[in-house]
Image (tube, helix red, strand yellow):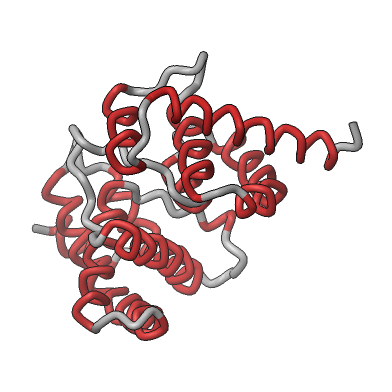
């Protein structure tokens, strides 16, 4: 009981740390998550309602976006204040949550839902650069390098066709060696994009060539 009372008074960074221990200390993690949600839900709801109005979506959708945002936090309590552009921890966390919220809103408009898949099906296609960064599993140093690279690639990726971009980003996330991606991801590409495997390979080759050409020009080669 004393630990739970301490959690209620903990700073937000400590709450996220407790949430990250959900496998080892599930009760404490749940308590920390509850406190964290109560602490930020109104601020995130306000932001979600503003964005939903801009996209002609209802306040009910905004509530769904908030739920999906916190579901994402439960799975990935990965806020790093050292990378925040503000000294104030609460403001930094709100900005982080708002970015997650916007990504969930994009998921909603793309797929009609923002709900988090379970562990067995959590092999989503990558639609945007934000999706790519959020789902990346690289270490912190490589993540920093990746973000710098993405700022360079944003122009060329936005110039790709939608299917080209999805295939390029999805392959970049799921292939670490060679050209193979998990079979469920390959099946999702076929089903959601309406393409046969040969067409997907062609799209990938075209996207890779366009990005490589851009980088060669950018680097003055």
> In percent of the image, x 50 and y 21: which residue is there?
176
Query: Residue pushed farthest top?
Result: 178
> In percent of the image, x 33 and y 54: which residue is there?
16
Q: Is residue 194 left or right of residue 158?
A: left
Q: Percent position (x, y) of residue 215?
A: 77, 37
> In percent of the image, x 30 and y 54: which residue is there?
72
Q: Is residue 115 left or right of residue 181?
A: left
Q: Quadrant of residue 79?
A: bottom left
Q: Which sits in the foreground, 54 or 96?
A: 54
Q: How many numbered marks appear?
A: 0
Q: Percent position (x, y) of residue 54?
A: 41, 83
Residue 11 showing in the rendered view: no
Q: Is residue 59 above or below residue 179?
A: below
Q: Is residue 62 left or right of residue 84?
A: left
Q: Is residue 100 above or below residue 117?
A: below
Q: Which sits in the foreground, 109 or 52?
A: 109
Q: Quadrant of residue 49?
A: bottom left
Q: Which sits in the foreground, 22 or 207?
A: 207
Q: Quadrant of residue 64?
A: bottom left
Q: Quadrant of the N terminus?
A: bottom left
> In percent of the image, x 62 and y 65: which residue is there?
85
Q: Percent position (x, y) of residue 46?
A: 34, 84
Q: Is residue 111 left or right of residue 141?
A: left
Q: Which sits in the foreground, 142 or 104?
A: 104
Residue 25 showing in the rendered view: yes
Q: Percent position (x, y) of residue 169?
A: 50, 39
């Amino acid at each position: 009981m004393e630990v739970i009372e301490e959690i209620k008074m903990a700073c937000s960074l400590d709450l996220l740390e407790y949430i990250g221990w959900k496998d080892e200390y599930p009760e404490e993690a749940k308590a920390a998550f509850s406190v964290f949600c109560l602490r930020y839900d109104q601020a995130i709801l306000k932001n979600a309602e503003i964005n939903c109005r801009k996209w002609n979506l209802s306040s009910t959708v905004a509530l769904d976006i908030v739920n999906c945002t916190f579901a994402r936090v439960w799975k990935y309590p990965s806020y790093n204040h050292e990378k925040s552009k503000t000294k104030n921890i609460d403001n930094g966390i709100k900005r982080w949550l708002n970015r997650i919220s916007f990504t969930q809103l994009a998921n909603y408009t793309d797929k009609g839902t923002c709900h988090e898949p379970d562990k067995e099906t959590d092999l989503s296609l990558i639609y945007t650069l934000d999706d790519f960064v959020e789902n990346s599993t690289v270490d912190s140093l490589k993540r920093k390098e990746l973000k710098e690279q993405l700022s360079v690639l944003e122009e060329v990726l936005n110039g790709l066709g939608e299917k080209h971009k999805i295939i390029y980003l999805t392959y970049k996330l799921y292939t670490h060696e060679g050209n193979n991606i998990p079979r469920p991801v390959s099946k999702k590409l076929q089903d959601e994009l309406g393409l046969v495997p040969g067409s997907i390979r062609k799209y990938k080759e075209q996207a890779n060539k366009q990005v490589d050409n851009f980088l060669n020009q950018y680097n003055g080669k």
